[in-house]
Image (tube, rainbow, N blue to C red):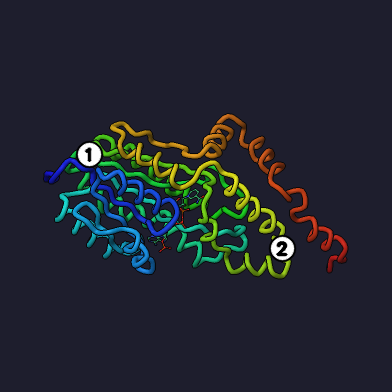
Amino acid sequence: MTFKDDRKVVLITGCSSGLGLSLAETLVQADRYKLIITTRGRSIEKLREYFQESPNVMVRELDVNNPVQIYGLINEICCAWGGIDTLVNNAGVCYRSVIEHMDPDAELEQLRTNYLGPMSIIRAVLPLMRERGKGHIINISSVSGSVPMPTMGSYSSSKHALEAASEALWYEARPFGVQVTLVQPGFIRSESYKNVVLSKKAMLSTEVNGSHAEFYRSMAPLVEKLMGFSLSNPRGIARKIQKIIDMSRPPFRIGVTADAVVFRILRSVLPNGLFRRLMYSLLPGSTVWGERLQSLSTSVPKVG
Ligand SMILES: NC(=O)c1ccc[n+]([C@@H]2O[C@H](COP(=O)([O-])OP(=O)(O)OC[C@H]3O[C@@H](n4cnc5c(N)ncnc54)[C@H](OP(=O)(O)O)[C@@H]3O)[C@@H](O)[C@H]2O)c1
């Protein structure tokens, strides 16, 4: 199978906002790729307002959890442009909740979108890349894929799963000329934190001052503040991803914000126990976590 011109064919998921939108804009402006810009049905009209269809740009609906849409779109791309050079698995969702408050439906949706969906798309494009002896799969992970934080356990787990599978895939795809890259952003200065969802129990706990209310009260403003102060914005990270797309020998794992690089270095040089204790002491409010309920339980005489 041969490509019709030398523009790389790049498929990006989750382009209606944040990083995906910036990456799509950056690549459209560069005008040297064939792009398939995608998002779920609920945002497709918004995406069509942003991007014009052209001989080098397709705007398509793609829910990463919908196998019919995945195979339909890949078939269409192959007929039009002969195959896919680069897949960017960017779509993601983020639920904030302590493990105790995570509800099974939200947990499953997060795991499906952040891990199982990307795996389905990879399974659909990999045989095509393998046959051509080249291709590049870029999975957008997170610093949470290396460093779990309180109230982010379920999100972190979905990114850890993505990281583990990507590492296995690196070995499996390499002999066939297919490259794999994990991109790890840390805090990004953007409005995307507004898309972070509290689980139902997490919301309730916050409202009624429940068992883990202090965790939510301290972690949410921390994340928003760190995002606000971050030197990295989606546009800058999009330019870094463009460079990775253009590389002939891309790295396997790359931190694309300063905090992501620092966290990974600390994680790898400090003993695990020391790292966790350091993190615990640095997290705002950690000194009072659990204090209120502990004092309540000691003031109430135990039955039996
Ligand atoms: N923002 C950060 O600080 C940060 C940090 C580290 C890692 N990341 C990672 O970077 C990636 C982009 O994040 P972002 O901050 O730019 O998020 P965002 O602004 O919330 O955008 C997420 C995108 O994913 C799409 N999406 C959600 N579920 C989907 C599904 N089932 N199928 C297809 N598309 C779906 C959304 O589309 P709809 O419009 O349909 O909802 C949206 O276009 C994610 O993988 C995220 O985990 C972000």
Q: Secondary structure at mark 2?
A: loop
Q: How many marks?
A: 2
> Which sits earlier in the primary sequence, circle 2 or circle 1?
1
Instruction: Say above or below: 239 vs 78.
Output: above
Q: Are marks 2 and 1 in contact (CB under 8 Å)?
A: no
User: CA gap, disc 2 to disc 1?
Assistant: 52 Å
On the image, the x and y values in percent for residue 169 come to: 34, 42
161 to the left or right of 33: right
Question: Looking at this view, is 145 or 138 the one in front?
Answer: 138
Which residue is labeled 2 in the image? 211
Tag on residue 38? none
Disc 1 residue type (three-letter): Lys
Instruction: Say above or below: 28 vs 134.
Output: below
Quadrant placement of the C terminus? bottom right
Ligand 1 is in which quadrant of the figure? bottom left
135 to the left or right of 89: left
Disc 2 residue type (three-letter): Ser
On the image, the x and y values in percent for residue 22 come to: 40, 50
Quadrant placement of the N terminus? top left
> Given this view, does label 2 or label 1 mark the residue nearer the observer?
1
Q: Secondary structure at mark 1?
A: loop
Instruction: Say above or below: 96 vs 22.
Output: below
Q: Residue at x 65, y 54 (%)?
A: 221
Q: Residue at x 46, y 47 (%)?
A: 234
Q: Residue at x 32, y 56 (%)?
A: 120
Which residue is labeled 1 in the image? 134
**Neighbour class for label 2 at 10 Å: few (<14), some, many (≥20)?**
some
Q: Quadrant of residue 292?
A: bottom right
On the image, the x and y values in percent for residue 36 come to: 27, 54
